[in-house]
Amino acid sequence: MKPVYLIDTNVVLRFLQQDDPAQSPACVDLFTRAEQGEFSLQLTAVTFAELVWVLTSFYKHPRAEVGQLLSNLLQNPCVLVENKDGVHQALQSFAATNADFVDCYLAAQGRESGHIIVTYDKDFKKFPGLACRTPEKV
């Protein structure tokens, strides 16, 4: 069984952004070796949330660009992601709305599980068919 490495946000950023002459080549090599089947790389949903935040706030990438860039990463066969379908749905919603990624992810979880989301956040109205209530209504 080949090894699986849990990857931190900063490694993914160096790979995607190619902005650090010392670290970026090592990160590209890491992804290349994973693509060649030497090992797998695992990213968490929290890592995707941090990637979205850094790419939009620090690097100032447009939402649609971030959604596409991270969807491409998600589809890479050497990248394992917890709740891949939920992350993918959240990225699509993030690119198409002005809701926060975490809200998009929670909405995807609500849709998938059928659970009601308890919130005061009005952004959840942007997700048709999603059941939401305030705490007073539970």
Image (cartoon, rainbow, N blue to C red):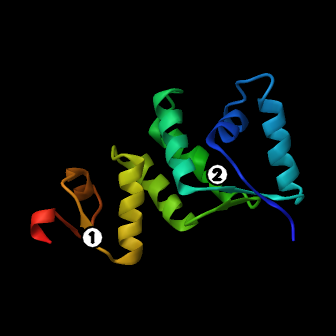
Looking at the image, residue 71 lies above or below residue 135 = above
Q: Which residue is mark 1?
A: 129
Looking at the image, residue 30 lies above or below residue 56 = below
Mark 1: which amino acid?
A: Gly
Looking at the image, residue 133 lies above or below residue 93 = below
Quadrant in which the N terminus is drawn: bottom right
At 35% from the left and 62% from the top, the residue drawn is: 107
Q: Which residue is mark 2?
A: 72
Q: Identify the secondary structure beneath mark 1.
A: loop
State the image coordinates of residue 92 (x, y, percent, origin top left).
Answer: 47, 55
State the image coordinates of residue 61 (x, y, percent, origin top left).
Answer: 51, 31
Q: Nearer the viewer, residue 13 or 66?
A: 13
In the rendered image, the residue lying farthest to the bottom is 114
Residue count near mark 1 (Cα–Cα under 10 Å), binned few <14, some 14–19, many ≥20: few
At 24% from the left and 70% from the top, the residue drawn is: 131
Q: Is residue 13 left or right of residue 39?
A: left
The tag earlier along the polypeptide, 1 or 2, is 2
Mark 2: which amino acid?
A: Asn
Looking at the image, residue 48 lies above or below residue 20 = below
At 83% from the left and 54% from the top, the residue drawn is: 34
Q: Is residue 10 left or right of residue 105?
A: right
Q: Is residue 59 left or right of residue 6?
A: left
